[in-house]
Amino acid sequence: MVKLEVESETWPIEGGFTISRGSRTESRVVVVRVTENGVTGRGECVPYPRYGESIEGVVAAIEAAIPAIEKSSTRPALTLTMKAGAARNAVDGALWDLEAKTSGRPAHEIAGLPAPHALTTCFTLSLGTPESMQAKATEAAARPLLKVKLGGEGDLERVRAVRAGAPASRIIVDANEAWSVEMLKAYPPELAKLGVEMIEQPLPAGQDSWDASLPRPVPLCADESCHGIDTLPALKGRYDLINVKLDKTGGLTAALELIRAAEAEGFKVMVGCMLGTSLGMAPAFLAGQRAAYVDLDGPLLLSRDRVPGFRFEGSLMHPPPRELWG
């Protein structure tokens, strides 16, 4: 007999976190536990208001699916039971963990992947004034790869300030849909001079029909514009990378399928996250093994994390302990 339990948790963010859409001081996550014959698998998701999700809505969606999940607790069946999104991600993660524990095989082996190796994650600097962002960049200057949150007007000054604070760090930037087409034409050449390697989601999702011949001196990555395989055709020729997040795809199962499809279409891949704990990062860590960029720094931005959680050496993430997941 399979039993599914769901609950929400709150985790404080160290110093708060700001992007173009607003600020927050805590991360609210939903945790699913699936138990069979005394063995329990866990999964975590972060409901995202940008996609119409809430803690209450995600919990309700999981609870509504409990009878179907308890009747057929397999990941393939889950894609028929639940739509893509955070709710399915939490259940999918729990089923991966349960299968690993009951079979005695690690999740990477079940997925047909090589044993995972340590990954270097981005470290995110939240949106602020150029002065505050330079101060944060100076604190993080020893980290090899910084992800800089932008907000539209004044972004060049922000990046110049970050570059001054962290002259040796690699930099990618994330506009979170805050730019206009005019900014997309004007900003990238200047960002290229500052050594910026990639620009994530410059324009609002749904406004990706700009002239595909527009020069891209800095590669562009689709985040809010990319959810599943069906979204790839509209991105081809306009984006160079896609950001795969398990809370968008609805779990590791669908994320691995999206990565394979994207690579076949010539996209490079970034694997990102919502702001959650090590439990939420663990399945994404497997998806990130071949990624061009890994952005799984959620635990580094929290005041505290799960125990045990990922072991970090600076920005280097070691494979998750088996007690955590998978």
Image: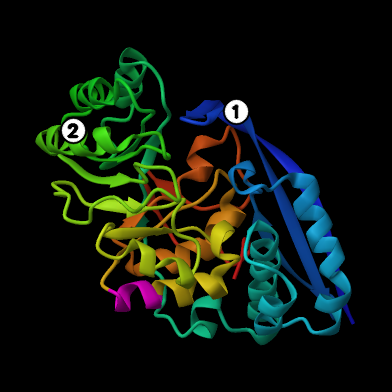
Q: How crowded is the residue under tag 2: few (<14 C-alpha within 10 Å), some, or many (20+)?
A: few
Q: Say what amino acid the circle numbered 2 marks.
A: Ala
Was residue 296 drawn as part of the magenta stretch in this picture?
no
Q: Nearer the viewer, mark 2 or mark 1?
A: 2
Per the rendered image, the range of residues in magenta is 260-265
Residue at left 60%, top 28%? 24
Q: Secondary structure at mark 1?
A: strand
Placement of 71 over or under 17, stated as above or below:
below
Residue at left 59%, top 55%? 280
Residue at left 37%, top 64%? 234
Residue at left 39%, top 77%? 261
| 128 or 35, nearer to the observer | 128
Mark 2 and mark 1 lie on one chain; the one further toward the N terminus is 1
Which label is found at residue 24?
Answer: 1
Placement of 222 over or under 185, stated as above or below:
below
Q: Quadrant of residue 263?
A: bottom left
Q: Quadrant of the N terminus?
A: bottom right
> Quick check: can you spot residue 117?
no
> Quick check: can you spot residue 86?
yes
Q: Position of residue 206 (x, y in %)?
A: 45, 51
Q: Position of residue 45 (x, y in %)?
A: 65, 54
Q: Position of residue 265 (x, y in %)?
A: 30, 75
| 199 or 91, nearer to the observer | 199
Q: Secondary structure at mark 2?
A: helix
Which label is found at residue 186?
Answer: 2
